[in-house]
Structures are given as C-alpha cells and as structure tokens.
Image (tube, rainbow, N blue to C red):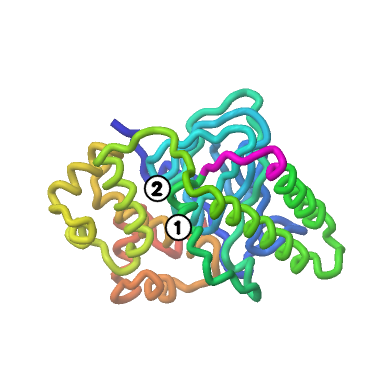
Amino acid sequence: MGHTMSIENCNIFSLEENEQLIPGGVTNFLLSDSNGLPVLPPEHYSVKPNLPFFFNGLLMGICVKGEASVSINFKQYTLKANSTLIVQPSLVCRIEKQTDDFAFEGFFFSFNFFVGLVLPADFKALLQIGRHPCMEIGEADMTVLRGYYHNLVERYRQTQLAYRVQIMRGILYAMLLYIVSLYKDNEIVRYSGTQTRQEEITAKFMTLLNDHYKTNRTVAFYANKLCISSKYLSQVIKITTGRPVLQWITDRVISQAKLLLRTTSMSAFQVADELNFPNPSFFGQFFKKHTGTTPYKFRRS
C-alpha cells in the first residue's frame, strides 16, 4: 500500500505572475537548496523536507553527488550523481530518502519566466521528460550543465546588474534546451522501479486532476476519462493513497484556493470565478466546510 497523503500534509507553494518571494530575488524564479527544496523566507512558507510538495512551476537541476530516491506522482525514481531532474508543474513530488553525501544544484521557475522567448516547435520532448524525469548523463555533459548553473547563480546574486533578469532568462533557456537535446539523443531513458496497474491508474488520475479540477469535480468524469468504472477508480485511489478519490478532488480545489488567497490580491469573487464556482457564496460555503474558516479569515490569518 502506498503512503497516505493529502494536500493538507504537503508543502504547497506558488510562483504567481509578478510575485517575488525573496528580497533581491527574481520574479517567477527560486533557487533550491542542496537537497532539492526551495529556498524560501520562513515568514512566507515553511518547507518541511519530510513531506511531499505541490508546485505550479518546474523544478530543474542536476545531482552532483550521492543518490536519492524520488517519488513523482507515485512513481519511484533513483536520482544519482551525474543525473538531471525535471519535475513538471503540479505533480506530487517527494524525496523519499537520500544518502548523506547527496548534493543537488537546481532551481524552481514558472513558465512566466520565459515571457518573450519562443520555444522551438519540436518541444515535444517535454512529454518524454514527463515520462522520464530523471536521466543519467556523461561527465562532459554534466560539466556543461554545471557551467550553465553556476553562471546563472552568479547572475542571480548580482542584484545591481543591468538586464539581470534578461541575462538569467537566456542562460536558463540555453540550459533547458541543452537538457532537451540530451533527451532527443537518448531514446531510452531508464525508469527505476516497476509500476503496477493500480499505480498507473493513480498517476494518470493525478495528471487528469491537475488538468481538470477547476471544471470537473465528480468521480464519474475522471473514471470516464480513464475508461474504468467510478467504483473501480475509487477502490484504486483508496488502496494506493489511503484516501478517497473525492478527497483528492476536494483537496486539489482547496489547495489552489488557498494559494490564490495567500499569494495574490484576487478578491473572493475573483477566486470563485477562477475556480468555476457558480457564485462567491457557494465558494465561501465550500471553503468553510472543508477548512473550518471563511476565505476572508483565512487570508487575514
């Protein structure tokens, strides 16, 4: 049986448009620490390393030493020295365990960070990355990627540098393209661990949930998408996660509502509209039922 998890027991953080979380930092961009966790001011978020997290952007980086077992949407991957890691938006991600010498160099960013840059038309490699978020690479390629990384960090720390953000954006863009080129050259990317049929259904459900939670909140909708019965989907999710499927749907909606209330200036009316509630009153009742407080009191707490 899988780990019991809920949104309430996850690290949740967001990089909203125009949000700068750290004084002297960069909008839509965060560095990670050596364990692959975001470097955040304690007064803004409290990151608990032993819990999984949701993030509305990408985590990208390289393992330079040691080894870690990483769970991404209930799939287990082994991140080793000389490996890349890319975790796409809104996935359940958790570092299960790591060696004492584990060291990671990476960062978190939203797609908004790339405003003004045009991604190549063959950027379908992102689909391959989604299936294989960890990839082992050679020493020469690791040297190239570490060069990009350290150049990016140096520019990040030059807070008075003219065109600092534009320079960082270009470096990150080049680094991302380099990693994508490695994927295109490596048709077989290893996946560590076997995936049962139930785990496959769970992973697909989580992906569908992230795509449709704003507009579809019934078990039947997701079961139909997966071509299985609602009863079977409910059984599978309960077995693999320890929680009912409706709880996952509710938690996903509540987590996004909390993010919008805490990290944006959107009114309750705007949040209700963003999450496709029929009216603010219905949203307020839903929020209070599942959190014990009103959207207004939550925002001010």
Amino acid tagged 1: Leu
Observer-side mark, 1 or 2, equals 1
Circle 1: is it few (<14), some (14-19), or many (20+) Cα within 10 Å?
Answer: few
Residue 279 image position (x, y, % from top left): 31, 76
Depicted 105 relative to depicted 292: above or below: above
Q: Secondary structure at mark 2?
A: helix
Quadrant for residue 297, please give it: bottom left
**Residue at the (25%, 41%) spot, across then down:** 197
Residue at the location (30% across, 62% down)? 286
Q: Which mark is residue 7?
A: 2
Left or right of 55 on screen, residue 102: right
Q: Quadrant of residue 180?
A: bottom right
Residue under the point 59% across and 44% down: 84
Mark identifier at residue 127:
1
Q: Is residue 167 magenta?
A: no
Q: Amino acid at mark 2?
A: Ile
Q: In terms of image quadrants, where is residue 117?
A: bottom right
Image: 77 above or below 120: above
Of residues 241 and 285, the one drawn nearer to the viewer in this rendering:
241
Horizontally, residue 273 falls left or right of residue 226, namely right
Residue 155 lies, with reference to residue 275, above or below; the image says above
Question: Residue 132 placed where, x, y %?
Answer: 47, 46
Range of the magenta residues?
A: 134-142
**Of the image marks 1 and 2, the number of the one nearer the N terminus:** 2
* 138 in the magenta segment: yes
